[in-house]
Structure formats: C-alpha cells, structure tokens
Amino acid sequence: MICFDLGGVLVRICRSWPEGCREAGIPNRAHQPGPDHDVRKTELITRYQTGRVDCKGFFRELSELFDGVWSPQEIAKVHHAWIIEPYAGTAALISEIQAAGIRTACLSNTSHSHWGPLLEDPAIASLDVHHASHLLGLHKPEAAIYRAFEDAVGLSGKEIVFFDDLKDNITAARAADWDAIQIDHASETAPQIRSALEQRGVL
C-alpha cells in the first residue's frame, strides 16, 4: 500500500501564521508571544486534530492564545484559507499507481473542518482508503497512530510505503517499520513521489 500525508504532499498549505493571514486577507498584526506560547499552541492543535475540541472552541482558544490580537472570527478565516491548492500531477500519479494494482491511502493530521475541503481534491478523493487524526483520535508522530492504521488496513509496516513532509513523522513511521520517504513541500511533490516509487520498482 502507498500511503500519503496530505498537507505538504498532495496539497499545498500555508506554512506560517503570516502566510495564513495573507491567504485569508487578514492583517498580520504585531504580537509578542509569551514564553509558553509554542507549547500551548502545539497542545491546542493536537487536541483539535484529535477531535477533543470543536471548531468554535479551537478558534476561541487560539484567539485567547494570541491575546485577542485576532478575533475568533478572524482565526476562522485564516484556518479556512490554510489549504491553498493541489500539487500538480498528483491525481494522475495516484491513478497510475492504482492502475498498477496497488492500493492507496492517506494518513494525515487534520481536523473536521479541513476534512471536507481536502476530500474535494481529485487526488485525495480517489484514494482507496482515508484515515486522519481526527477520525482515529490519535496524532502523528505518536507510535499508536501508525499501529492503528496498520490494524485498519490489515497490513504490517513492512508492506506500507509512506510519504510525509515532516521529519518527526518520517522518523516515527520508520520506527514502526514503514518504508517512509520525506517530501520537500517547497518543490513540486509528484516528481519526488514518482522517483521514490520507481526506485522501489512500483512504477
């Protein structure tokens, strides 16, 4: 099975808060984060992406974390603008993989509000199996999410080729015996995926 992360692999996403503000047409105002800002933000995002806080709660808590510099309504606009566009050639590549008789899947850290728009992308919609953090209640790079995916698809790690753009997720996948390849999200991703699959004799 060929398994893909979504943001940074099949679809281009914002990589920073200023970029998100720009995509949403929201002013990137000055903000001085507190010493525990990043830790609290990571914890909040993890709760959101594992379904432990709803959208309104997430927007409210993130606004509070930003000391009200951006309102919950503005936070929501940035959030909804976070997914930018598909990477070129990914839908055709997935079709080619499937034509070779190989199943495809995704395993992504994402949220309920992003899930619908992601599934509208032709490449993602065409995948044979769809799994995500908010559905499994687990989060990459936790070891448990990789095991849960294996159980769900009935495969061992050695039978899974996995593409992700984040080093920590790749490291965790390799620890689970997955054949994990890190993608450079700043470049077109389809050629990188194709090259890795050709090296493995898949295409």
Image: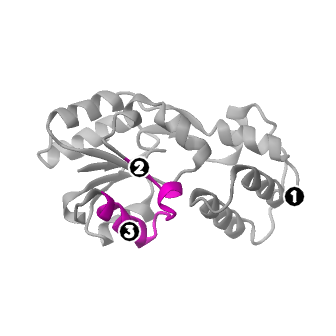
On screen, 109 above or below 173?
Answer: above
The tag earlier along the polypeptide, 2 or 1, is 2
Looking at numbered disc 1 in the image, what kind of residue is underneath it?
Asp
Q: Do the residues bearing badges 2 and 1 touch, measured as CB atoms within 8 Å?
A: no
The residue that mark 1 highlights is 67
The segment highlighted magenta reads 130-152
Q: Is residue 133 magenta?
A: yes
Q: Which quadrant of the view contains residue 121? A: top left
Q: Position of residue 203 (x, y in %)?
A: 15, 38
On screen, 68 above or below 185?
Answer: below
Identify the element where label 1 is drawn. loop
Q: Is residue 127 magenta?
A: no
Residue at image location 40% in from the left, 37% down from the top:
124
The tag earlier along the polypeptide, 3 or 2, is 2
Residue at image location 77% in from the left, 71% down from the top:
35
Identify the element where label 2 is drawn. loop
The residue that mark 2 highlights is 5
Residue at image location 68% in from the left, 59% down from the top:
53
Looking at numbered disc 3 in the image, what kind of residue is underneath it?
Ala
The residue that mark 3 highlights is 172
- 34 and 164: which one is in front? 164
